[in-house]
Image: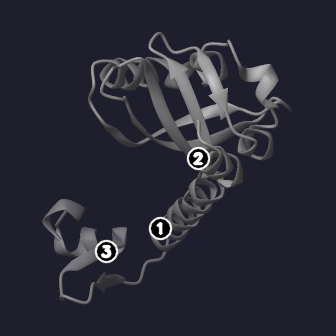
Amino acid sequence: MSANYALFFQISPDMFLVLDIQGHVLETNIAGVRVLGWPPWQIRGKHALDFVHPEDRERTQFELDQLSIGNVSANFETRCQHRDGRYRWISWTGATPADRSSILLIGRDVTSTKESWLRVAQRENFFHTLVDQVSSYIFHNDTNGSRDYSNAAWLNFTGRSLSSE
């Protein structure tokens, strides 16, 4: 690797992984320490799936298989285990060089985004549960005038369902 590319590899805030065609880590950058807590020398030689959450391994293996035959894989997400045992959500983009000698992956930590969306979904669920207990009719239309929410009282009054709103 030329000095310019080596510097680019090391200064990236995103994780760079170079895997052999079977999925073993050949090289990684220092961002792996920041994202997952693992120094490069503790990752090298291990199979990439060793760090992936058990529920995500089948999907991740599928993506690695696709990459190994030359397909580009963009934005697949997996949970990877941090050195402290917690899991982090990583969004991966990958490709394989023309000679198919390795798999190249760039991983971005999207844990905070995933956790934010989860909190929003939980709050929305709480709001809907609360509003469904109210006997007043409550509904909401989006900016196009389409109904995007109706509480249980409104649905009971109109005899409609959420899908027909």
What residue sits 37% from the left and 26% below the top? 63
Which numbered disc covers residue 150? Answer: 3
Give the labeled residue for mark 2.
5
* Residue type for callout 1: His
Callout count: 3
Residue 165, placed above or below residue 87: below
Kind of element beneath mark 1: helix
Give the labeled residue for mark 1.
128
Q: How is the image coloured?
A: one colour
What residue sits 18% from the left and 88% below the top? 145
- Depth order, front residue of 41/149: 41
The earlier-in-sequence mark between 3 and 1 is 1
Kind of element beneath mark 2: helix
Q: Residue furthest left?
A: 164
* Residue type for callout 3: Ser
Q: Nearer the viewer, mark 2 or mark 1?
A: 2
Q: Marks 3 and 1, Cα distance to the nearest angstrom?
A: 9 Å
Q: Marks 2 and 1, Cα distance to the nearest angstrom?
A: 52 Å
90 sits left or right of 152 in the view: right
